[in-house]
Image (cartoon, grey):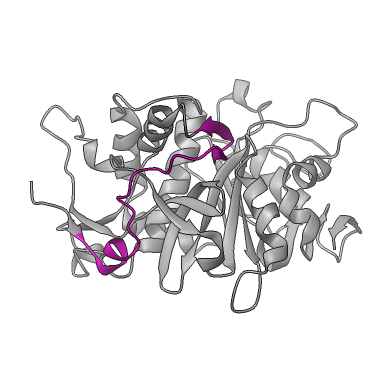
Amino acid sequence: MDAATLTYDTLGFGEFEDFPETSEPVWILGKEFNALTEKEDILSDVTSRLWFTYRKNFPPIGGTGPTSDTGWGCMLRCGQMILGEALVCRHLGRDWRWETVLNIVRLALRKLTVLNIVRLALRKLTVFDSWSRLAVHVAMDNTVVMEEIKRLCMPWLDYGGAACAEPPGWMPKHNGCLEGACALAEEETALWKPLVLLIPLRLGLSDINKAYIETLKQCFQLPQSLGVIGGKPNSAHYFIGYVGEELIYLDPHTTQPAVEPCEDSQVPDDTYHCQHPPCRMHICEIDPSVAVVRTTEAEPLDPDLQWGEQVFDTLPILQVFLLEVCNFYHRYTSTVRDGI
């Protein structure tokens, strides 16, 4: 196998430095660590995250297109890492540690190729494939619309709760049901589809506003956290935690050869895990445009608790932003709460 190619982005941040010995807590995707006594646990946790990087020598996109995404695919690779983390948490659990991940990587190779991610990126709203049992929603225009999310997570229900009834025409339909709903087994129709919620935010004008720093760090403390996509202009990173004033991230700016399954259909997965100390960047160095990502596995157990209130209360950054949580679009009804 060819040696991995390091780009200028990778060489510039000194990410191969050992993890600092500090008494400050280390937070990684909802888990707290002690850097003085749990350094090996920290490295094991980071290594267990799926690491998607630039690749070369894959089949030409579209038959005649590029065979490498070096220089332009970093945001797509960060999206793959987000979805990969959601799949691992969904099927293996947050505390899973990397030994063998053949099934997850095989599915990721099939479904999360650069070409498929590009196709998904062209869609504002998407119900993910039935094999993943995940729904993906992007909160556009600084608004989280509860009814949109309920339609994604319970696609077999209409406004009144009837299964497979035809809803208003603005949602995709197939044979009278929401697209993808009829493919589900009958016993699954009472379930809430797990949700991956992406919330694009701007934390300042040209630089991050220091008033938002602590709130952004709190997002990594949530058990539901899937991290943050951000970085610098033309250079995206997947931020998974923080220590002190530094963010911990996985860097996609390494070019590795494309991986093909072996004859026995197994996938050599060592290049899908970052096996050196994690990268770090001072929080003030990041571009103010970020996307906070969280997951929601189930409906609230308390029937008196509005789902929108749950999302709002468990995502502290919403409480300091001009971001709105509402039941329906404005033309239908009033908002749940304004995060002003």
Point 71% across, 58% down: residue: 169
Magenta region, residue range: 6-34
Q: Position of residue 122 (x, y in %)?
A: 48, 65
Q: Nearer the viewer, residue 248 or 307?
A: 248
Q: Give the farthest residue toward the left.
A: 1
Point 32% across, 58% down: residue: 14
Point 79% across, 66% down: residue: 322
Residue 268 lies in the magenta-colored region = no
Q: Position of residue 111 (x, y in %)?
A: 36, 45
Q: Quadrant of residue 151?
A: top right
Q: Position of residue 65 (x, y in %)?
A: 22, 70
Q: Can residue 148 be seen by looking at this rendering?
A: yes
Q: Nearer the viewer, residue 126 or 281?
A: 281
Left or right of 328? Residue 288 is: left
- Relative to 63, residue 26 above or below: above
Q: Give the farthest residue toward the top.
A: 187
Q: Can residue 131 be seen by looking at this rendering?
A: no
Left or right of 210? Residue 258 is: left
Number of numbered discs on residues: 0
Q: Position of residue 307 (x, y in %)?
A: 79, 40
Left or right of 127? Residue 328 is: right
Q: Quadrant of residue 192?
A: top right
Residue 13 lies in the magenta-colored region = yes
Q: Nearer the viewer, residue 88 or 340?
A: 340
* The C terminus lies in quadrant: bottom right
Point 33% across, 69% down: residue: 72
Left or right of 41? Residue 311 is: right
